[in-house]
Structures are given as C-alpha cells and as structure tokens.
Image: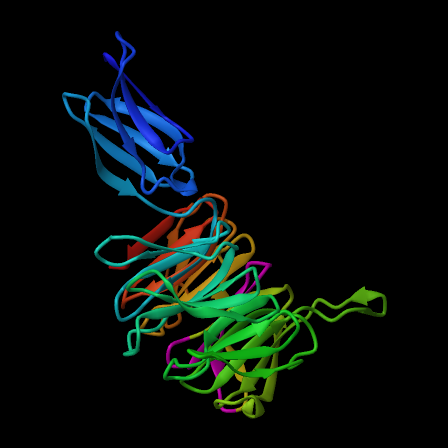
Amino acid sequence: SCRIATAGGDKKLRIWDRESGAQVAEALVGAGALDDMQVGLAWPSAGAVLTVCLDGRVLLWEVAADGSLKLAATVDGTQGPINCVACDGPSGTMLHAGGDGTVLLTPPSGLHLKAKVGKGVNHILAHSAAWSGPAQAWVCSLDDCARLVSLETGAFVGSPVEIKQFVVGAAWADAAETQALLATSKGGLVCLCESGIEWTKDNLVPRRPTAVACSGAIGRVAIALERPDGSVGGVQSSQFEVQLFAISGSADSVTFQASLQEHAHEVTALRFSPSGEFLASADAGSKILVWKVSADGAAVAVRDFCNHTARVTCLDWLASGRRLVSGSIDSHVFVWDVDQPKNKVQLSEAHKGGVSSVAACGDKGFASVGQDGFLQIRELE
C-alpha cells in the first residue's frame, strides 16, 4: 500500500501518503473524550482500517480512493470478565456487566446502549415477561449502591440508592415485581421500590449470607449462610444451612419457616422456579439439589444433578419451571430436566475460565456469561 494509518492519544485516526509523508485525511473519534483514545490499529485491506478505543470499542473505517475516512461500523461491549447477565422479559433486552463498571444493554435490534456505573457490577435484576411497567432494571455495584437503569435510553433513573453494605444477591419480593429484595453481607434484607428504600430488616440471619432467592408467587425467601464458627469435638462443622422464610410485603411479615441442611459445602446459588414449586440450590462442591417447596418448608426432590466437576456459580429456571440451567467454574453449562433427571444437555467449555452467570430468555432460550468476557445466547430445540 502507498498509505500509512496512525491513531493514538489525540483520539484521531490519520491517513498518510507514504511517498510524500503528507497527511491525506483525518477523523476525530466520537467527541474526543478520554474513552475515545485510540490504543490499537490494523489495516486488513486497502479499503478498510480497524481501530480500538480505550473503552474497548472496535471501529471499522472505510477508506475511499482519495484517502477520506468514513465510520462504517462499531463493535461495542464490556472489558474483562463479565459478572452477571439478565434478560428483560417484555422487550427481550439483554443486560450484562462486569468489573469495568459498564452495563451493556442489547435489545433485539442489536443497537447497544451503555450505562457506566464506575464501579464493578455484581447483580442485575430485570423483569419477567408479565411486567407491564416502565422498561427498567436494578443494577447493584461494588460501591454498595443500587441504581435503576432505563432500557430505552441507557441512562440511570434518579439518584443511586445507598445500601451501605455489600449486596450478596437480589430478587423480586412480590409477584407484581414492584419490590426488589436485596440480601446484605451483614445478614439483613433491604426492600427497594422505584422511589428508594421501602423497608429494611436488620440481622435477620445469624451469619453472613452467601446466596439468596425469593419467590413472590408463594411469598418465600431462601437465604444460604456461611457455616458456623468453631468446632465440635475438635472437628469444624461442614454443614451449610439454607434458611427459608415467609414474606408478604413488609419487614414485620418476614418470619422463619425452616432450615434446609443437605449441603456439605458453601451454597453458592439459589433460585426458585417461576411458580415457586421448586427451589434449586448449588454449592462449591459441585452439588445441585432441587427442593419441593411445601407450606411449612421444603424437601429434596432431585439429587441427580451432579455432573459439574467444580464450584457451581449460577442457576436459573426456564419459563416452564421444569428445566434448570447451571454454570460452573469448570467452564461447562448444563440444562437439567426435573421430570427426567438423567436427561441433560451439556455445553462443554462454554466459557474459558469459568461461567459467571446464566439467565433464562423466553420459553426455551438462555444466556450465559463468563470470565472470557463473552455473552452467549442459546435456544433449546
């Protein structure tokens, strides 16, 4: 080629004539902000240049015969591992985020929107298909705040809600999905509505929670706890408890129901099925249990979901409430069937480095994210 391309910290792409050393064309990236700084460049063909922005965007530029530049396409995303994923039922918009503090919103049209928190994001709570209110989702981040993000604009709605404690997990507290329930590292619950904190319940459980799930359909909350301190007869306890509570809309309504004790390793994920019929639990020892929920507690219904080889990190139910998706740091994703426990779908090496989060999408689809920084969306036949 008779031309040279350069891009750098001045947020500009320049085309030069190799023989004369004269600049032929230049283009400013975006508005010239810090995130528009150029950190990489490639010239795959005579008529195209690829550049990489500081915030991870990949830009495709068309180079005309006279050297003039035109931005043809943008590939956008997050940087580094992805911690969480959610699907907005009414719109089908996918939300995912990670340690870079960026929430990426991807509607079915494929036109991305970005919301920047500035701190790592660890939980996203989106609405089910039954929701008919504003297109919004809750985002919890490592600055111990929760934020409502608009799925239509990518902007945050109102001011951040200060939780002032690390958020262990988030779920809808009511069937109408108007109350977001957060479990905190100090053993309490925080209930959020669109206007802010509606109520709190401090010191509900005696030890630090490791996972939480809630079913508004049946008014139940499940909280997994760290194992007790100390030892009995010189042997440290290996019993990891899941406490089950009833809830009906207020702090005073939260009442203890039962202690579920079947896990011998730290419980890492909990999820109620859409109807509340089942509670799935998974632990750091690769074990997954499905509990049949009753009026006064729960009993194990399925023990056969045991093909992971390492810590299970995430669970979600498909819309039917009969199939369960799981992900693990072993990098595999499984789809289990409670009616036929021996039948399973295995997606080997779905995410290099481990699976961080899974989320149901529609009737037969699900999304997964992981340490490899990729979002994958699949649909079962």
Q: Which residues are magenta?
A: 273-295
Q: Is residue 289 magenta?
A: yes
Q: Is residue 243 left or right of residue 9?
A: right
Residue 2, horizontal then vertical, whole percent: 23, 12
Task: Name the residue located 40 percent from the left edge and 28 percent from the top edge.
Answer: 8
Hey, which quadrant is residue 377 in on the image?
Answer: bottom left
Q: Position of residue 257 (x, y in %)?
A: 58, 88
Find residue 246 and report its horizontal and vertical position in percent: 53, 88
Q: Quadrant of the N terminus?
A: top left
**Residue 72 quadrant:** top left
Name the residue: 70% across, 78% down: 206
Q: Nearer the viewer, residue 44 or 154?
A: 154
Q: Nearer the viewer, residue 225 or 82?
A: 82
Residue 46 in the image, given as x and y percentages of width and height: 20, 20
Above or below residue 173? Residue 225 is above
Q: Nearer the viewer, residue 376 or 31?
A: 31
Q: Quadrant of residue 167?
A: bottom right
Outermost residue to the left: 65
**Residue at 35% of width from left, 41% of height from top?**
57
* Residue 280 in view here: no
Tell me what residue is drawn at x 35 percent, y 72 percent: 127
- Name, please, the residue furthest toward the top: 19
